Image (tube, grey):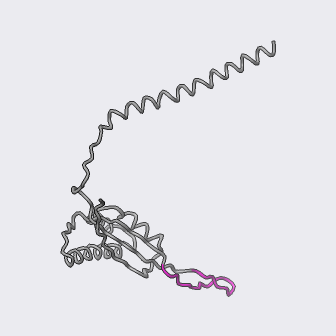
Amino acid sequence: MAVETKEYRAEAKFQRVSPQKARLVLDLIKGRGVQEALETAAFTKKRIAPVIHKLLVSAVDNAKYVSGEQGTDLDVDNLYVKQALANDGPRMKRIRPAPMGRAYRYQRRLTHIVLSVAERGGGESLVTRVEEPAEAAKPANKTAAKKAPAKKAAAPKAAKKATTVKKASKKA
């Protein structure tokens, strides 16, 4: 029995920035809490950062509105950025003057940005997990890992000695 979480989206289409540059900012906020993501977008020194900040505010407002319309309980402090995508939009073909009366073509890229926020599935869980102390298992693995290479290193030395003994016996 899986608990379904509601996802709230906001989109900004036809933004005049390349998707690669937009992904630089989106990767900073992906997976973070909404408040932390808003602060990160507000203080990032990229041209697309204010657009992403505005889009994130819009996604949070969409979450508030939809949860109010549906009558569901939404904790805004528990929201996080679930998905942040920068997809390719159409490309504008442009021409730049080049030497000797020629022209070079280049493309101005546009971006469709998609942000979705969801509520973290915090304290409410149907299954109670009991974890074993991992500290006891770690030292045993480290000592075993240290001993294994030492044995492997000793074996080639013995093999080298044996081959030199064989070569010496063949010469005599």
At x 37%, y 78%, the residue is: 11
Q: In which quadrant is the N terminus drawn?
A: bottom left
Q: Position of residue 129 (x, y in %)?
A: 27, 47
User: Extreme bottom residue here?
Assistant: 101
Q: In this view, does 88 lie above or below 124?
A: below
Q: Outermost residue toward the top?
A: 172
Quadrant (top left, top right, bottom left, bottom right) of the C terminus? top right
Query: Which of the 4 image quadrants contains residue 63?
Result: bottom left
- Determine the residue positioned at 38% across, 74% down: 114
Q: Give the range drawn in magenta.
A: 89-106
| Quarter holding residue 12 | bottom left
Q: In this view, does 8 lie to the left or right of 96?
A: left
- Residue 56: where, in percent of width, then height? 31, 72
By secondary structure, the bulk of the magenta-drawn segment is best described as strand
The residue lying furthest to the right in this view is 171
Who's the residue at 32% across and 66% down the image?
81
In the shown orientation, is residue 136 left or right of residue 112? left
Q: How many labels does the image show?
A: 0
Q: Percent from the top left, x then y, of residue 142? A: 42, 32
Q: Is residue 30 magenta?
A: no
Q: Which residue is drawn at 45% across and 29% down?
A: 144
Please say whether residue 100 is one of the residues in the magenta stretch: yes
- Residue 88, given in percent of the width and then of the height, sits at 49, 76
Residue 43, by quadrant, is bottom left
Q: Which of 83 and 71 is in front in this view?
A: 71
